[in-house]
Amino acid sequence: METFQDSALRDDVKRAVAELGFTTPTPVQQAAIPAIMGSDRDLVALARTGTGKTAGFGLPVVNDVDTDLAAVQALILCPTRELCLQIAKDLADFSKFRKGVNVVAVYGGAPITHQIKDIRAGAQIVVGTPGRTLDLINRKKLKVDQLQRVVLDEADEMLNMGFQEELNAILGATPEDKQTLLFSATMPKEARKISQDYMSDPAEISVGHSDAGNSRITHQYFKVRASDRFPLLRLLIEMDPDMYAVIFCRTRREVNGVSEDLRYAGHTADALHGDMSQAQRDDVMNRFRRGRIKLLVATDVAARGLDVSDLTHVINYNLPDAPEVYVHRSGRTGRAGKEGIALSIVTGKELRKVREIEKYSKISFELLDVPKQEEVYRLRALRFAEKVKQAKLDDKVAAYLPEVVETFADLDREQLIQQILGYGLGTLSSQLSGQKTVMNAPEDSRPDKRSNIEYATIVFAAGRNNGYNVPQIIGMINRKVPGKKIAFGKIDIQNHLTYVGVDAREAKKVVAAFDGAVDRGTELNVRLFEGGTKVSGPKGDSNDSFKGKKKKHYKPGNFKPKAKAFKGKKAKW
């Protein structure tokens, strides 16, 4: 199957595919479509996010629906509402010229009565999340006795989200002679067990499911101190004002803090996490898809099933614990043959994760030097100049060109360029004026030379926006921990978080003293950061260490326009 026109798909489905602009199938589509349509045999397909899996199973499903049969013939299960709606939309596009094919999406967070009504109206394909689908089956509103196909899309994600029991119950209620199709980026033992329990001698195809290095994604990382994460993020965004990215954070509180700080810095950013209502999440996603939001800050759970075209970057504000999660994250850029960049902000304690990801996915990471503010100014000035050169003059405005030229008559060429540059980028220096200098984390690890004290970082869930300054932070700690005065290292106060270097021998005592502490109406949630990462002492010397790949200097060509968990009690932010 070299092209879709060469396939066994119906002419009206081929017509829809052609109208969508698809000509050559992706590798997973080349393997899956003939395997699904050519037999009744079950199929296990391992393919990473962004490889065209939806068309791989969706085209055969749409193609084979019997429009004369008013019954649900295909059931597609997926992990999230967002992915459910996306798949349903894609299937509706595939069936545009097949009259009588009805696709219904069922998911939590929406009135079940409306979905029951849609099913009764003659649904032949149902796309659903496991919880709502099982609820409808138990209510006997979704009848599955005439199912011919069941698709488990992103099976590993559904299992990671805890849908094992729901999947077992749904599959147990379906006919034994159906065709079962399991699509997954990875194959955990739970997914393997599903294939053993509910599938009969399945065929298997594997298309780059763990080898993300075969894609058009460049994997790069910067090694910095934990307190430099946000300043570095700002620099990277300022260097590329056309960036369209998803920024992954570990916690909901961090998502809110980073997105708010980005908005305060003048960027179009918003948050996406599980504490938001479904209506709020839908609103954010709609604005992000339309490009009104250029930077989406999200947790992994909230972003599961996220399918947005043309992302230039995926940024790991924190690296995930599991390598397969990194594969899912990075797979959201570099789609449809386009180039993408996956950037990671890494501390010394996270370097082992980089090596684990490289080993798991055969990715080769590139270590970059932290860009300097001077480079931000230079690149922005050159980009602005290029845009001015390419600008088109509207005919109506051109009519007044002689008067405008006369206005600039007393300026020579260099003065005119200065004025244009000042007008276009006059606020850039003020935007970066409060930005701290970010440095590469030093390669060696050593205690502070003046006092021979090693420091550990603790973090407070409060910062500049709560009215704190350095003397107040020191005073508060001294009051909470009476007796011998504690040695302090570097203190970095951000809008919503404060990082404090304290004598590593006293760090646990400080955390214990603040257990359950509330100040100014804010829960401080004091925790050891990065499991006790040693940070800068009074001189600013870092104790992080890493001897690895040779750094590549940051160059414009390297950046194309395109907290490890807290040790101790689980943080609620």
Image (cartoon, helix red, strand yellow):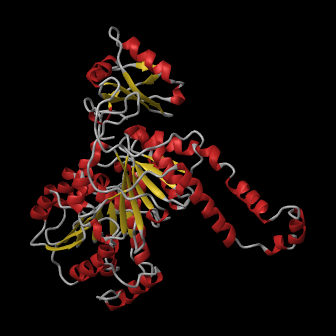
Residue 427 sits above or below residue 314 on the image: above
How many badges with numbers are in the image?
0
Left/right placement of residue 452 relative to residue 280 reads left
Quadrant where the N terminus sits is: bottom left
Q: Quadrant of residue 386?
A: bottom right
Q: Is residue 433 left or right of residue 181?
A: right
> In the image shown, does 565 or 376 lie closer to the viewer?
376
Residue 559: image location, x then y, percent: 46, 62
Residue at 51% over, 24% down:
468
Locate the C terminus and report the quarter of the image it occupies. Answer: top left
- Looking at the image, can residue 321 be seen? no
**Is residue 426 at all visible to an observer of this figure?**
yes
- Rendering coords of residue 282 (x, y %): 48, 53
User: Residue 351's spot in the image, x, y percent?
Assistant: 27, 48
**Picture residue at 35% right of the left edge, 86% below the top:** 4
Where residue 380 appears, as percent x and y from the top left, is 59, 58
